[in-house]
């Protein structure tokens, strides 16, 4: 990089730190401000923050690798989660905001009772806030290290010094500014990251080596441009992305509702729930989550996909394990002075938005659901804000240690999905069925860890492991539910009075509370879910068709998107949810 490039990167860091300093006093007022922005986030900031968090440093590299290995259709490994994401929009976003709690794991003690509820809250605080959180930060650190090595030819021994220096800056501004600073910085970082990604895609696609969209299509096999996988009885078919029926069912039929995965939890979870609970009200919560789903699946992926396709043409010599490096090499080889600095800043932005969020919500679990709940219960709010800032720094150091032991990013993804296989149905039904208890969740979380080593020893690999893990976990938690005592009746009544989720599976409790009106119109919400899914996929494939000049498909896709918007709008309006947000 040249002087101008470094100047762009330095300006980015200075501006990000300036935002943190600006919001530091506001964050220090209370833990409510530090972790939830005083529950006053507008929908667009909450939604942008969700999208920015899922745009990590590893995301463009992962998409480029998927495209290089399996063509565009390879992205179905994560596109399938849109089904669950839209379910969260119309069925759960308003419920989370209505709950009035600080963290997802606090839910355990407003929904369940007894020692099992306390154990579940404390266990999930450590399991999610510490263990899973540092694994996620570890693979994001690993991705940034890979980027820096590819761009600057830094040695493996030296690169982590730069990664950890960057993480120290993130931890500083996250600890200083709380969620307000994180969210506002997220919006700025997302604009930088997306602008850089789009510019890179345009420059590389129109380079003389590639020759534009037509050049891509002439130089590569047709299967690379397929939007959908081929379903077949064999693992591969002429190089195209082909799935066996078993694997197809695992990808499209199971993963989106059955597996726990950060950012795509069935019913919402983690930082997505944190943003929903930080929104101004239920409407803002719903529309923030809807904006997130559309932007995440339909708008954001195409610049990465285009660069991934171009990398196949430009760097055909890359081995299977090096495919993700094609994205980095295009930045190194094709960007002029100034723009290279912008792209490096964009990757730092993607990295920092993710790490800042992980540090903030991870600290919220450790402080709110472990330290304040079980260890030091009688201090004032200033003490807990200070403890939150200290915990942010501690989590940073723990994640640094974990980073040094991660060798394969995709292996961490698969491990997390397998560890959460079968948990999803409990996370969905706990809102709508009174009989679910704390032991249901506990058994669902433990079972995959018992079954997974057996499958590993049998040679069964991901995603086929899900076909066994999901039914096994589901059977176990259902049996445990019926052989253990239900939640205390008074707790169930308090929960129903506060949340009033409605539905026939709450009839036993609803009959005891005739003055409480439960939610209705589930048919309209189901219709909204169906057309929300249509909206996301029609936008996704409509934009793709536009890029590749398939104008008939563009027309069909955008007409479907328009119809979906009209139907969703009318249904929300009839439910008193008209889009009149200020």
Image: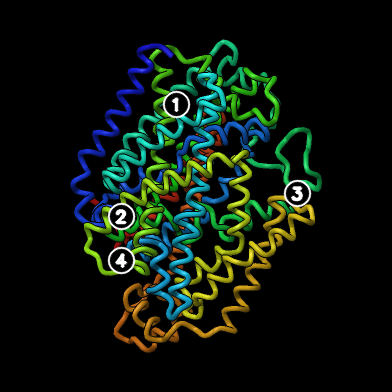
Alpha carbon separation for disc pair 3 and 1: 34 Å
Q: Which residue is mark 1?
A: 198
From mark 4 to mark 1, how far is it between C-alphas? 39 Å
Which of marks 1 and 3 precedes in the sequence? 1
Q: Residues within 10 Å of mark 4 (few under 14, many from 20)?
A: some
Residue located beneath label 4 in the image: 100
Of residues 1 and 508, the one nearer the viewer is 1
Residue at 27% x, 53% y is 386
Distance between the Cα atoms at labels 4 and 3?
44 Å
Kindly check if marks 4 and 3 are in contact, taking CB atoms under 8 A apart as contact. no
Task: Say which of marks 4 and 1 sits in front.
Answer: 4
Q: Are marks 2 and 3 in contact (CB under 8 Å)?
A: no
Which of labels 2 and 3 is toward the front? 2
Residue 253 lies, with reference to residue 109, above or below; the image says above
Query: Between 409 and 494, which is closer to the camera in this rendering?
Result: 409
Q: CA distance from mark 1 to mark 2?
A: 40 Å
Mark 1 in CB contact with mark 2 (< 8 angstroms): no
Packing grade of label 1 (10 A; few <14, some 14-19, many >=20) is: some
Quadrant for the N terminus in the image: top left
Q: Is residue 111 above or below residue 131?
A: below
Task: Write the residue at 45% across / 78% down.
Answer: 115
Disc 4 secondary structure class: loop
Alpha-carbon span between mark 2 and mark 3? 51 Å
Give how far across and how far down residue 166 sits, in percent.
40, 33
Mark number displayed over residue 555 = none
Locate residue 435, reporting x and y percent: 50, 80
Label placed on residue 244: 3
| Disc with the residue nearer the chain's start (4 vs 1) | 4
Q: Identify the residue position indicated by label 2 in the image.
A: 387
């Amino acid at each position: 990089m040249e002087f101008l490039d470094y100047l762009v990167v330095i300006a980015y860091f200075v501006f990000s730190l300036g935002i943190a300093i600006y919001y530091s006093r506001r964050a220090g007022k209370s833990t409510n401000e530090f972790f939830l922005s005083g529950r006053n986030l507008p929908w667009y900031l909450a939604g942008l923050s969700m999208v920015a968090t899922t745009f990590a440093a590893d995301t463009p590299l992962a998409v480029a690798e998927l495209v290089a290995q399996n063509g565009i259709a390879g992205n179905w490994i994560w596109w399938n989660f849109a089904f669950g994401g839209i379910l969260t929009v119309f069925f759960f976003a308003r419920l989370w905001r209505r709950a009035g709690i600080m963290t997802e794991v606090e839910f355990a003690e407003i929904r369940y009772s007894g020692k099992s509820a306390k154990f579940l809250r404390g266990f999930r605080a450590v399991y999610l806030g510490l263990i899973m959180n540092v694994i996620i930060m570890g693979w994001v650190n690993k991705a940034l290290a890979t980027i820096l090595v590819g761009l600057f030819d830094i040695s493996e021994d030296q690169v982590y010094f730069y990664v950890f220096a960057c993480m120290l800056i993130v931890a500083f501004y996250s600890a200083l500014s709380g969620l307000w600073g994180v969210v506002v910085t997220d919006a700025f970082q997302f604009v930088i990251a997306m602008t850089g990604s789009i510019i890179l895609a345009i420059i590389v696609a129109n380079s003389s080596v590639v020759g534009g969209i037509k050049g891509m299509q002439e130089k590569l096999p047709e299967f690379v441009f397929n939007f959908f996988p081929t379903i077949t009885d064999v693992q591969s078919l002429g190089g195209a992305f082909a799935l066996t029926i078993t694997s197809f069912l695992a990808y499209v039929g199971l993963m989106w509702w059955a597996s726990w995965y950060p950012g795509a939890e069935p019913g919402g979870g983690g930082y997505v729930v944190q943003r929903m609970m930080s929104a101004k009200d239920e409407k803002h919560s719903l529309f923030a989550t809807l904006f997130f789903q559309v932007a995440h699946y339909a708008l954001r992926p195409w610049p990465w996909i285009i660069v991934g396709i171009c990398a196949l043409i430009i760097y055909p010599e890359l081995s299977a394990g090096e495919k993700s490096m094609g994205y980095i090499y295009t930045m190194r080889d094709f960007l002029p002075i100034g723009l290279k600095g912008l792209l490096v800043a964009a990757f730092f932005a993607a990295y920092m938005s993710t790490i800042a969020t992980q540090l903030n919500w991870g600290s919220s679990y450790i402080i709110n659901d472990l330290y304040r709940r079980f260890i030091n219960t009688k201090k004032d709010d200033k003490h807990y804000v200070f403890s939150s800032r200290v915990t942010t720094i501690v989590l940073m150091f723990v994640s640094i240690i974990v980073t040094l032991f991660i060798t394969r990013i995709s292996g961490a993804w698969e491990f997390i999905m397998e560890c959460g296989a079968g948990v999803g149905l409990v996370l969905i039904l706990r809102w709508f069925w009174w009989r679910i208890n704390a032991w249901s969740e506990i058994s669902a979380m433990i079972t995959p860890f018992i079954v997974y080593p057996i499958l590993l020893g049998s040679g069964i690999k991901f995603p086929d492991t899900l076909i066994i893990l999901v039914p096994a976990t589901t059977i176990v938690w259902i049996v445990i539910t019926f052989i253990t005592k239900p939640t205390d009746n008074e707790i169930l009544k308090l929960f129903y009075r506060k949340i009033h989720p409605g539905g026939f599976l709450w009839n036993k409790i609803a009959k005891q509370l005739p003055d409480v009106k439960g939610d209705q119109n589930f048919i309209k919400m189901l219709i909204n879910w169906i057309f929300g899914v249509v909206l996301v996929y029609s936008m996704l494939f409509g934009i793709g068709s536009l890029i590749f000049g398939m104008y008939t498909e563009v027309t069909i896709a955008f007409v479907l998107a328009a119809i979906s918007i009209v139907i969703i709008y009318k249904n929300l309006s009839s439910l008193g949810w008209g889009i009149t947000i200020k």
